[in-house]
Image (cartoon, grey):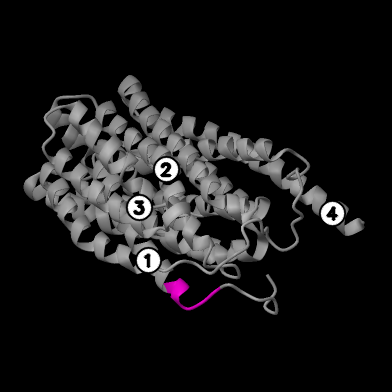
Amino acid sequence: MSQREPSIEIRYGWVILIASFIIHTIGLGAPNILFVTLKPIAEDLGTARAVPSFAYSLLMLGTGIGGIGMGWWLDKRGVMQPVLFGAVMIALGSFLAAQSEGKWSLYLANGVLIGLLGKAAMIAPLVANATRWFDRHRGLAVSIIASGQGVAGVIWPPVVRYINDGGGWREVYQYYGIFVLFTMIPLAFLLRPKPPVVVVGAVEPGITQTEQVLGLSPRAVQVAMWFAVVGCCMAMAMPTVHLFSYATDLGFAAARAAEVLSLLFGAAFFSRIAFGMLADRIGGVRTLLIGSCCQATMLLVFSQVDTLTGLYVAAFMFGLGFSGIMPCYALMIRLYFPVGEAGWRIAGQYLFASAGMAAGGLMGGAIYDLTGSYTNAFLAGFSFNLMNLAIVAFLYTRQRRISLQGAVA
């Protein structure tokens, strides 16, 4: 958007943005608990690692499915109500998880309470709401909220490890539930104001409202984006879910494993902000291609590395790459489709992202249980990443061709 064109941005939009970022960061404590305590949970419950891995899968799948309903709630009543409700559900789910004596209560706590009814309100609705407050800095705004993943990855693993070492994984869940109640609920009230009014059918400058998108039906483009996000998120889940366990399997102390995971997400925080600024300059599609290429490369590196130094380097580089991927899908949706469709389309994108993360996390655990190694899991992730690259490259090629044809005309 040109600086001379009118903008919807106002100062309170930045309050919305910072509150959304903090809420998202807190909400991401739940999956980080499973990352760090995967082995202790499996040992305590007397199950295979696939059980806590499946709990994570249910959490992510529930988050995606619930996001559709939370997106609808956002469209009808604003973002504050679903966030308040979600905060209470995450707390209740954490308290239930702390009392789990078997896999079913663990599944219920993570899949239904924390995921479907809780964390579902903490990403897609927050991102969709932010896109309605920003136009000139939309890429940066979306990336700031999404960067909560990086901050959460730096903060939560060492905190979880410290509490787990002192009192066990059940105590981790209890403290987390209390923390959620005393932080998320006050922050949610900052989200009460409504965003600036935008015409419901409006599309981005330079986009013509037609029955086709990129020369294809809107449904075809949306389905392609769904397949693309499944591919990249299945690949993304392999290191993020299993890196802590992989490091300890190689013989490194839990403290070092937590450092590796924190380094990955720490790099992701700074990189995500940079990718957001880059997307405002070169567009979401090209930015996504860059991030996906980096992610694919580092999955190959993870499959071969077995030293602590190598893990530090691979985690840092993976964090730089994968962090730029997810925010780009929201930007692509705002580019290709009218603003009135952004809420449910962004929620749908996160649904398929959650399905990909769930499938990838479960597949990684299953491959380990079958082979006793994570090498093949990382290679499987690489193959799914190639699917993502092929689809996004196809969309970019069509976008580029149409742009060139318009320039010639």
Name the residue located 56 percent from the left edge and 69 percent from the top edge. Answer: 137
- Element under label 2? helix
Q: Compute the Cα span from label 1 to label 4.
A: 43 Å
Is any part of residue 304 visible from this angle?
no
Q: Nearer the viewer, residue 166 or 171?
A: 171
Three-letter amino acid code of the residue under disc 4: Leu
Q: Which mark is residue 170?
A: none
Image quarter for residue 269?
Answer: bottom left
Three-letter amino acid code of the residue under disc 2: Gly
Left or right for 380, reference 90: right
Name the residue located 25 percent from the left edge and 47 percent from the top edge. Answer: 90
What x and y, as percent, mark residue 83? 33, 55
Which residue is labeled 1 in the image? 192
What x and y, as percent, mark residue 46? 14, 25
Mark 1 or mark 4: name the one nearer the start of the chain: 1
Q: Compute the Cα span from label 3 to label 4.
A: 43 Å
Which residue is labeled 3 in the image? 82
Mark 2 or mark 3: name the one nearer the start of the chain: 2
Say if 351 sits above or below 264 in the image.
Answer: above
Which residue is labeled 4 in the image? 404
Name the residue located 52 percent from the left edge and 43 percent from the top edge. Answer: 349
Q: Compute the Cα span from label 4 to label 2.
A: 39 Å
Name the residue located 29 percent from the left edge and 51 percent from the top edge. Answer: 85
- Element under label 1? loop
